[in-house]
Image (cartoon, rainbow, N blue to C red):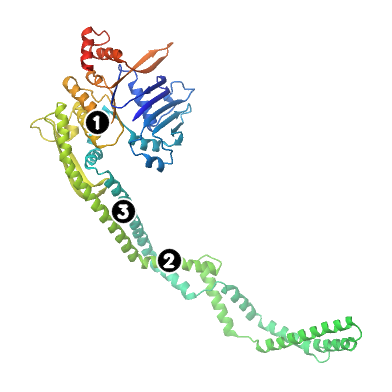
Amino acid sequence: MLTNLSIKNYALIEQLKVSFKDNLSIITGETGAGKSILLGALGLVLGKRADSSTLKDTTSKCIIEAQFSIKNYRLEPFFEENDIDFDQETIIRREILPSGKSRAFINDTPTTLQVLQLLSEKLIDIHSQYQTLQLSDVNFQFEIIDSLANNSAKIESYKRGLLVFNKLTKELKKIKEHQAVANEQYEYNLHLFEELEKANLKPDEQAILEQQLDKENNIEEIKLNLTEAQALALNEEIGIQALLSSFTSNLNKIKSYALEYKELYERSLSLKIELDDITNELENLNETIEFDPLELEKLNDRLQLIYNLQKKHAVNSISELISIKENLSIKVEAVENSATLINEKEKEIKVVAEKIDKLAFTIYNERKNAIPILIQKLETVLTNLGMENTRFKFEITHSTSYFTNGKDELSLLISANKGANFGTLKKTASGGEMSRIMLAVKAILSEYSNLPTIIFDEIDTGVSGDVSQKIADIMQQMSANMQVITITHLPQIAAKGKQHYKVYKQDLDNNIVTKLMQLNEHERVNEIAEMLSGKNFSETAIEHAKQLLN
């Protein structure tokens, strides 16, 4: 519940601190005193957007801080999920800078407005007379029914399943779209793939072929030079072999005279052995080499095929062609296997659909069972609020469509007078009746929800007399389950509060500021007397105020 609220430099408030307690708290004050300013400040703490226009002193920052006691509301998972330290006495702080920028903190941990909004939904419900429009919103109507039906966990499970279902459905749609595009290009891609597949390209093939072609194109020059080299080596008189033999022989004759001569001889002998080997190799090569026009044609054809493929695909290497072939293979296989992929995806979707369909039908049955209970409770509360002839009709149908909270369609009809036809809320109920219906809804929900605090902002507008007394009784009953804070102009309601606060304006050195104080017993009597008969209240009004308080 809300235990403390501190406001500094906001609108007409210079500095204000107030402590709240459990049960029913009342806030009263003249029109324009600043009750809406309090709610505006609290709204900022709960994640509403703001700018520098909210600052009283535009040179200083605005600080709003609210403390909540949350030990009994099982909010630890929320704090863990958002990486925030949990504290049974949680403090939310909002700072608005003169620049218009704002900062938000939960237990001194910086956070975002989105997280504040999510947390506020679990802490407090601020209800104004304008929010009665929610009654006509089908999602709000479902929330009411689902609270009584205890459908929260089932709906969360359904939502998780629906996310998976929607994800798989999108994937299936994308597969089919890709298939449609791929089908149009299939024949061409298949032709390109088969052409590259038939070419049977090897990664290093091009360099080897180009070298072989260069050899074939220069076979005559190679033959000529091999022959001449062989002749130079083998000539009997001046050939390299004959000269090297004489050279080696001379060294052989003196090798025994000194170690250095022996070493020179051995080195020359090595030369002779190497030359003999080269000469033999020359002879073998010269015998085997010959011009082969068929081989030349074969090399030219193979290289031309490679060049043509590279030009066709606008690349410069065989490795790039191989990569293109692999991509084409994927595209071709995707089309050829698309039926299997689609079938597998449809099977996945069917499994998920069966699960969420089963959940949705359970939710539907729980709603059907809860509706008569809700109608009975609504009509009972409204009878106490002077709407004894009001009747409700919830028409719920289980559809084939998937909605965020199930597969149901809902229609709420109301008959506000005896014998009157059923119609929609907008057309049938007046503003005052809508306020009382909303109060009845909130009173019923307080029995089922785990919400710590609810604030009513003049929900009693348009009612008086006995009805206002009944409204006060209902609020008092609600406060047994939760903290209720209500802003009111009615003395009958003000008298029911366990705590009573007054909002007022004060002129401090020509500076109008809004103040808030908790009233003691004597001040409370005077405040209710003033609400009964105006500022110049009489002894009769005081006695009436005491009777209301007793």
* 361 left or right, relative to 5: left
Residue 132 — which label?
1
* 489 left or right, relative to 230: left
At horizontal 21% and vertical 34% (from top left) the residue drawn is: 444
At horizontal 87% and vertical 84% (from top left) the residue drawn is: 262
Q: Considering depth in this image, is 232 or 433 the residue closer to the camera?
A: 433
- The kind of residue on which mark 3 rests is Phe
Q: Earlier in the sequence, mark 2 or mark 3?
A: 3
Q: Do callouts 2 and 3 mark residues in contact (Cβ within 8 Å)?
A: no
Query: Which residue sits furthest right?
Result: 257
Percent across and percent down for residue 126 are 31, 30
Residue on which the image places disc 3: 165
Residue on which the image places disc 2: 330
- The kind of residue on which mark 1 rests is Thr
Is residue 386 depicted above or below 207 in this figure?
Answer: above
Q: Which of marks 1 and 2 is in front?
A: 1
Quick one: SS at disc 3?
Answer: helix
Percent across and percent down for residue 284 are 68, 88
* 355 left or right, relative to 245: left
Where the N terminus falls, by quadrant?
top left
